[in-house]
Image (cartoon, helix red, strand yellow):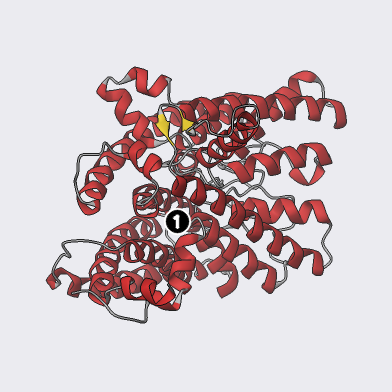
Amino acid sequence: MQDALNSLSYAVRLSVLAKYLGLLALMLAGLVLMPLLGSILFGDYHITERYLIIFVILLVAGLPSLWLDHPTDLHNNESLSITALAFIITPLLMTYPMMGSGLSFLDAWFEAVSAVTTTGLSTVANLEQMPRTFLFARAWMQWYGGLGIVILSVAILMNHHIALRRLVSPNGESILTTTRVYARRTLVVYLVLTLLGLGLLMLLLDNIFLALTHTLAAISTGGFSPLNDSLGDLTWPAQLGISLLGLCGAIPFILYYRLVRGSWHEVITDIELRALLFITLLMGLLLSTSLSFYMEMNWQEAARHGVLLGISAQSTTGFASLNLGTLDNTSMGLLIVAMVIGGGVGSTAGGFKLLRLLILLRLIQLIIRRSAIPTHAVVEPHLGDKILQGDEIERALLLILLYLIVITISWLIFLAYGYAPLPALFEVTSASGTVGLSSGVTSQALDPVLKVVLCIDMLLGRLEIVALLVVLYPGTWLGKRTG
């Protein structure tokens, strides 16, 4: 059996990786121009030099790919490898210019990983004293990291039929064509949401820089704020506006396209959208109650923080309106649940995604239902109007299990270093769910080993674990290759 599987499997084609990673390098070269120009505008010329060096490296690495042929097809392990390598290589390259703001290599890499994976955890203690180029670059990296993961999610979901059907209309096209079509639609939606968000925050904030950085970080559900207290010092309308932008980023992007196309009924009846709105409202209510009861806040204050934190955790945006290190255990537990679940498939949100939770709940419901019917009766598992296939259920359950395993192992490492159980669990869940909320554990003083653990968690969470495992699997690189 094993020999038969080996005979049917192929290693990735290096020419394919060279083609797409080369194109990625050229795309990154274009994206680097924004912080490069920003460094000139802000007068941070010592950082300009670093971005120029990275720009030249990316051009030299990417230009040869223009002469390589486009493959007629793309294998599953190739698409997953390209996805994973994109999110591994990009922060490594961006580490060098971020070191120009006075950070060590490890701290700069941590910030870059947190930015590209749209997490938002930071080891910087005083953000308001950092160069503006650094603050803009973090938000900009979150913005294009969020765009990248939404587009590349097609590659991750190639064999997840229901999820892929929600992203694009099945029309018999190849995955390459499908990805191009979806990429164009996503780019348009992403740009429109960004411009609308920027317009909104320009009205709510009296600072163009704050409006721009918060917009980039919110739409990408990244959560990097240039302010030390995140949303704490902003007005209530500004806090709510930024939080709602984050919630917009957690909604599957294809629904916006369908909304503009006039398919209102498809959007309104979408089971994952309904679940996202319901669980966000429920989380806000539970957090408000908990803050009022345990933290002895008045109802108005408890409701304000509860709603903001509920949206932030469920959308995995990671903005905070108060010091989370002071929260009661119940509130922290609720936030952990929200962070591990996350937002919608095909959005910029993290977590193991609501779609997979819905599949798990439907399976539990089916098991209970089957106990009350004759053994010979056939009951197909449905999600909405779609029949769940066996491999879809298997993948959903496997991914949930893998997420829990990653969180558990990381948590045990933090416990071994002497951290209190709940704050440690909160931190690793936030990293694995690419959320960015912090109980105060993440700081410059954090042990280097634990910083690396959190970086691995962020990468695993952003790549939904499987893509990174594919890169680490020897069979991906060794063995026979197709032409």
Image-based side of 352 in relation to 174, left or right: right
Q: Secondary structure at mark 1?
A: helix
Give the percent coordinates (x, y) of residue 23: 24, 64
Q: Nearer the viewer, residue 167 or 394?
A: 394
- From this view, report whether residue 349 is shown above or below residue 301: below
Indicate the quadrant containing the N terminus: top left, top right, bottom left or bottom right. bottom left
Q: Nearer the viewer, residue 11 or 32?
A: 11
User: In this rendering, does residue 251 appear at all?
Assistant: yes
User: In this rendering, does residue 194 appear at all?
Assistant: no
Which quarter of the figure has residue 79?
A: bottom left
Give the percent coordinates (x, y) of residue 143: 42, 48
Give the percent coordinates (x, y) of residue 151: 34, 49
Q: Residues within 10 Å of mark 1 (few under 14, many from 20)?
A: many
Q: Residue at x 54, y 56 (%)?
A: 461
Q: How many marks?
A: 1
Give the percent coordinates (x, y) of residue 142: 46, 51
Residue assigned mark 1: 137
Image-based side of 142 in relation to 320, left or right: left
Q: Residue at x 37, y 33 (%)?
A: 193
Mark 1: amino acid: Ala
Indicate the quadrant containing the C terminus: top left, top right, bottom left or bottom right. bottom left
